[in-house]
Image: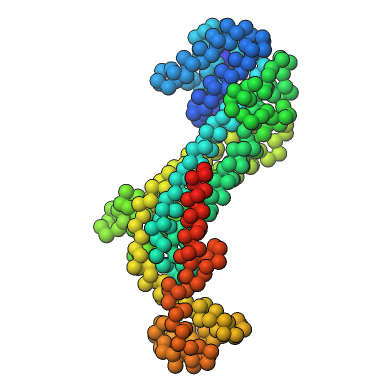
Amino acid sequence: MSKKLWGGRFTQPTDKFVEEFTASIGFEQRLYPYDIQGSKAHAQMLGRQGIITPAEAEQICTGLDQILADIEQGKIEFSVALEDIHMNIEARLIERIGSVGGKLHTGRSRNDQVAVDIRLYLRDELRAIIAYLEALKDSLLTQAEQNLDTIMPGYTHLQTAQPVLFAHHMLAYYEMFTRDVGRMRDCLQRMNVLPLGAGALAGTTFPIDREWVAQQLGFDGVTRNSLDSVSDRDFAIEFCAGAATIMMHLSRLSEELVLWSSADFNFIELSDSFCTGSSIMPQKKNPDVPELVRGKSGRVYGNLFSLLTLMKSLPLAYNKDMQEDKEPLFDSIDTVKGSLKIFAAMIAEMRVKTDNMRVAAARGFSTATDIADYCVRKGLPFRQAHEVVGKTVRYCIEQDKDIPELSLEEFRQFSALIDADIYDYVTLDASVNARTATGGTARCAVEREIALARQAQTKG
Ligand code: ARG
């Protein structure tokens, strides 16, 4: 019978398959640096408080440092019999420094230990994800700066609506990812409190100093209720919800990149390094990366649902169910990080086919609203102006003409209010540049937003 750290009250060994089935070590090894970090702070606190001697605390910390180095050099093989990362490390410690290692777990439980480990880990990952989001935002901003004169068709219902600057389109995504950064920061701020000290569920009988440990580990404070401390996974759910929203945004951008790189749109070309060919059709260059990211949104939504369902109806406090929190959380972290990383590079290298965009923008009577606005400024109620332009468009379709190609006489068939200056309003550039209010697509309005975004970047 392999000796269990909790084996005292047992007479029979654990069934081999049950051991495998209940172990979490297979998927939580990545927590090792955080488990060690948390244990060191705990041991130092025990020493300071006289719960163990300062010499014992030092022995424990040195042992933990050596174990960290061994793991990093691949010298340690984790054991399923030791169930989880906490007991794997603790067992090594006892092996290495003897029975004094057994003092580390004083005033602590695996329930508050795992809670602190996940928070320390997620905190680092959140910071990394925020950095990747900022990198993607920077790529979008750079594309915007380079495309202040690129006019594309703006769509509603995927039907040509009004011309917009490609820069403006890029900045729409910039806004989405800015809100995503906000969500990640909120999550980081709310979760950054120390649960350690809750013990198994009720607190501890030892005179521990939670505030000191919190400070050592860079937490802003301590959790306020021991039952909640060991059974709260809100922070993981909150992160997974934010991650799902990021993937939703990426999937929208993906969809546009796939459309735009098709022969039918032909608005952009993605760099070869983000595409693959077809094994049968030699002409093909497939936008695999955006397609795959669009597809991966599914698993990240699923992970959010897994966690919500996992936590639903769980009685207080810790339940073994909660061990199932890790795989969905890790998967969302890995997927979002990977997707953001690849998108930041892909957007930076995307080639924009300015001329094709402009030709497409001129199709579909995209400046029709501008004629209506023109008539309104000459005193016609908007509804009547709408009617005038509707008839003008129908005429254009029948005559197979574009709006700017109509003669003044042709225009005036529909309203006597139309004068020769109409031609100043129906070009793509005039249409775009007329929309100058904050948030509009006029070049000057877009330039203002770019300047604000760059300012926000330098402020950090
Ligand atoms: N592996 C466990 C988890 O991930 C650690 C906590 C175990 N606690 C317990 N009482 N079995 O949730």
Q: Is residue 259 above or below residue 47?
A: below
Residue 280 horizontal side relative to residue 457, left or right: left
Residue 410 horizontal side relative to residue 372, left or right: left
The residue that appears at 60% across and 85% down in the rendered structure is: 379
The residue that appears at 30% across and 58% down in the rendered structure is: 284
Q: Is residue 356 above or below residue 67?
A: below
Q: Position of residue 248 (x, y in %)?
A: 52, 52
Residue 405 horizontal side relative to residue 179, left or right: left
Q: Is residue 207 above or below residue 236?
A: above
The residue that appears at 46% across and 14% down in the rendered structure is: 66
Query: Between residues 333 and 62, which one lies in front from this camera angle?
Result: 62
Q: Is residue 179 above or below residue 354?
A: above
Give the farthest residue toward the left: 282
Q: Position of residue 355 (x, y in %)?
A: 34, 68
Q: Name the image quarter holding residue 340.
A: top left
The N terminus - image quarter: top right
The residue that appears at 43% across and 72% down in the rendered structure is: 429
Q: Position of residue 382 (x, y in %)?
A: 60, 81
Residue 166 in view in this figure: yes
How many numbered discs?
0
Residue 45 horizontal side relative to residue 356, left or right: right
Residue 26 in view in this figure: no
Query: Between residues 22 and 53, which one lies in front from this camera angle?
Result: 53
**What colour scheme has been applied to the protein in the rendered image?**
rainbow
Query: Between residues 358 and 293, which one lies in front from this camera angle?
Result: 358
Q: Position of residue 116 (x, y in %)?
A: 61, 27
